[in-house]
């Protein structure tokens, strides 16, 4: 069974930076898309960024320029570098992976809390 484990969340002041990591572990799997989503209190989960295995990236328009997604395919790990953080970035950040092997399925991590103080 493949699992996603996030790390790197925490409390940071506005203007600061954080780097989130999400590692996939298990046996004999392949991942096509990895990404990050976030959910703030009282709001729906929203896309932050995604990255394909070949490196193509997609970002929420409002986050372009401040957030950078990257991926290490050898480690089955996706990263999210978040700069110039704002209080409105406060949310639970969830890692997402779309597997193609052993079968097509979508996995979610448990989430990591990011809190930005003003």
Image (spheres, rainbow, N blue to C red):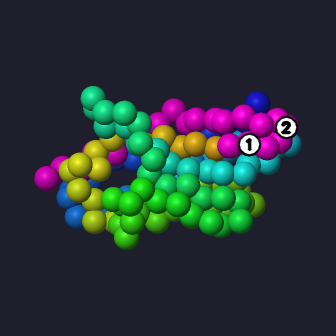
Percent across and percent down for residue 65 are 37, 70
Question: Circle 1 sits in a helix, a strand or a loop, which is it?
Answer: strand
Q: Considering only vertical position in the picture, is 52 above or below 103?
A: below
Say whether residue 27 is visible: no
Which residue is depicted at the point 62% across and 66% down? Answer: 56
Quadrant of the frame with the N terminus: top right
| CB contact under 8 Å: marks 1 and 2 | yes
Which residue is depicted at the point 58% across and 42% down? Answer: 96
70 displayed left or right of 39: right
Q: Which mark is residue 60?
A: none
Query: Which residue occupies the foreground of this view, 8 or 105?
Result: 105
Task: Tell which residue pokes out farthest to the bottom in this image.
Answer: 65
24 displayed left or right of 39: right
Q: Considering only vertical position in the picture, is 109 above or below 56?
A: above
Residue 61 is one of the magenta-drawn residues = no
Percent across and percent down for residue 63 are 36, 60
Dividing the picture into quadrants, the one containing residue 77 is: bottom right
What secondary structure predominates along the stretch shown in magenta?
A: strand
Residue 101 is one of the magenta-drawn residues = yes
Which residue is depicted at the point 72% across and 51% down? Answer: 32
Residue of label 2: 102
Residue of label 1: 99
- Mark 2: few/some/many CA within 10 Å (<14, 14-19, 20+): few
Which residue is depicted at the point 39% across and 66% down? Answer: 64
Q: How many marks?
A: 2
Percent across and percent down for residue 75 are 71, 57
Percent across and percent down for residue 2 are 73, 35
Q: Considering only vertical position in the picture, is 86 above or below 28?
A: below
Query: Which residue occupies the foreground of this view, 53 or 5?
Result: 53
Which range is magenta? Answer: 98-118
Query: Which residue occupies the foreground of this view, 4 or 62?
Result: 62
Question: Circle 2 sits in a helix, a strand or a loop, which is it?
Answer: loop
């Amino acid at each position: 069974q493949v699992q996603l484990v996030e790390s790197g969340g925490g409390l940071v002041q506005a203007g600061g930076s954080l780097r989130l990591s999400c590692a996939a572990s298990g046996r004999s799997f392949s991942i096509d898309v990895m990404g990050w989503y976030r959910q703030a209190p009282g709001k729906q989960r929203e896309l932050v960024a995604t990255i394909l295995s070949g490196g193509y990236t997609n970002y929420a328009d409002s986050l372009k320029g401040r957030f950078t997604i990257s991926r290490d395919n050898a480690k089955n790990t996706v990263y999210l570098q978040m700069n110039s953080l704002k209080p409105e970035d406060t949310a639970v950040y969830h890692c997402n992976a779309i597997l193609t092997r052993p079968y097509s399925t979508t996995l979610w991590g448990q989430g990591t809390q990011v809190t930005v103080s003003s």
